Image (tube, rainbow, N blue to C red):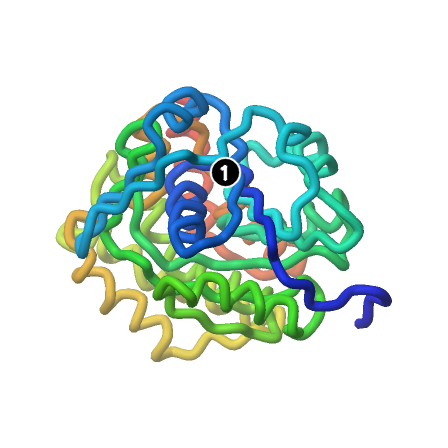
């Protein structure tokens, strides 16, 4: 697939749309590495303008002062790269937020969880602009402008929507690699999205359905631990049906790596406990719908999806 006129431009300016834990962390690290980063904020706007962004990581505490923080995209104007870090529950706002940030060759990178985000962006800004990134990191927002890092700077996987990786997405990966992120660039972004669901579906889901528990308690509670591998296997089977590779050793590695996280609260649990909307549709609903449409049974995922819908309704 070729898009005439699209090249790999230098990214002289960036906008972060959705400056929660993920957006604030990566945006601040990019700014501290010397990039021109502009943050689009809502509730944290005054606090970040006054106090900046503080990153409390295991190796150091980093502070970004004089943050270029804005309340409206029109105040930011067109930039070279837009990084979408909103929760998927806020995606309806993107049709209004993104156009003022675009010039003829602006690229749009989504760091969101689940399935369907690149497709939604393609319908809003055009498929030729859309890139995707998957984040393997542990960060939480402790207070306005204060981000705590448990597993940072982490790893990231990048790809382009509907086409093999080109020079542009490799340049994006280079931005994040500049401050220590372990990066890889893949030709099949959709495959990477399904692979990430192998961990997200059971651990984000059971953390809520299990009564608000951390990952160590999921693995330490027999009735919850017994659900982890079967859920992973269902996700892997669906992915394979669609032609994506999910090796057996990869599935087991997702279990093996989890005890090292300690008493980790997955992002969906953090949102649930804070009374915020949970990304139920993007992480559990969308893969279930795609599997159902293809005639693939996923009874365990269906039961977990139903339990999560009941939990968030309460």
Tag 1 residue: 87
Residue nearer the viewer, 170 or 224: 170
Residue 165: % across, % down? 64, 73
Kindly identify the residue that appears in the image at 30 percent across and 51 percent down.
Answer: 138
Q: SS class of the residue under badge 1?
A: loop
- Which one is in front, 207 or 81? 81
Q: Is residue 66 above or below residue 202?
A: above
Residue at the (61%, 47%) spot, across then down: 82
- Rendered view: 150 above or below 53: below
- In the rendered image, the quadrant that contains the N terminus is bottom right
Where does the image place residue 294, in percent across and percent down from the top left?
Answer: 66, 60
Residue 64 sits above or below residue 151 on the image = above
Say how many tags the image has: 1
**Residue in the image at 38% along x and 51% along y:** 32
Mark yes or no: residue 234 visible.
Answer: no
Q: Is residue 77 visible?
A: yes
Task: Please name whichever residue, 154 or 161, is drawn nearer the observer in this view of the structure.
Answer: 154
Q: Is residue 274 left or right of residue 127?
A: left
Q: Residues within 10 Å of mark 1 (few under 14, many from 20)?
A: some
Residue 5 placement (x, y as % from top left)? 84, 65
Image quarter (top left, top right, bottom left or bottom right) of the C terminus: top left
Residue 178 horizontal/vertical position (percent): 42, 65
Left or right: 82 as drawn, with respect to 21: right
Above or below, 18 against 116 in this view is above
Residue at 26% x, 48% y: name it: 149
The answer to which image quadrant residue 130 occupies is bottom right
């Amino acid at each position: 697939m070729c898009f005439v006129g699209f090249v790999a431009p230098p990214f002289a300016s960036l906008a972060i749309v959705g400056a929660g834990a993920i957006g604030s962390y990566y945006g601040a690290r990019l700014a501290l590495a010397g990039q021109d980063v502009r943050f689009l904020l809502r509730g944290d706007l005054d606090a970040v303008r006054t106090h900046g962004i503080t990153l409390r990581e295991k190796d150091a505490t980093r502070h970004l002062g004089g943050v270029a923080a804005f309340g409206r995209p029109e105040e930011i104007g067109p930039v070279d790269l837009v990084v979408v870090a909103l929760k998927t529950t806020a995606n309806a706002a993107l049709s209004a937020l993104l156009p003022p940030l675009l010039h003829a060759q602006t690229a749009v990178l989504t760091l969101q969880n689940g399935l369907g985000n690149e497709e939604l962006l393609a319908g809003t800004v055009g498929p030729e602009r859309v890139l995707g990134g998957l984040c393997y990191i542990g960060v939480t927002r402790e207070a306005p402008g204060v981000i705590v890092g448990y597993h940072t700077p982490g790893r990231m996987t990048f790809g382009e929507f509907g086409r093999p990786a080109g020079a542009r997405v490799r340049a994006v990966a280079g931005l994040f690699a500049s401050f220590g992120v372990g990066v890889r660039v893949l030709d099949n972004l959709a495959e990477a999205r399904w692979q990430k669901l192998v961990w997200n579906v059971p651990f984000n889901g059971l953390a809520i359905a299990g009564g608000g528990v951390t990952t160590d308690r999921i693995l330490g509670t027999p009735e919850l631990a017994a659900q982890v591998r079967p859920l992973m296997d269902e996700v892997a089977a669906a992915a394979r049906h669609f032609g994506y590779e999910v090796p057996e050793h990869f599935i087991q590695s997702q279990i093996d790596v989890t005890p090292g996280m300690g008493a980790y609260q997955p992002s969906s649990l953090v949102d649930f406990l804070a009374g915020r909307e949970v990304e139920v549709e993007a992480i559990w609903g969308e893969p279930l719908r795609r599997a159902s449409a293809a005639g693939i049974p996923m009874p365990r995922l269906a039961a977990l999806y139903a339990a999560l819908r009941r939990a968030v309704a309460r």
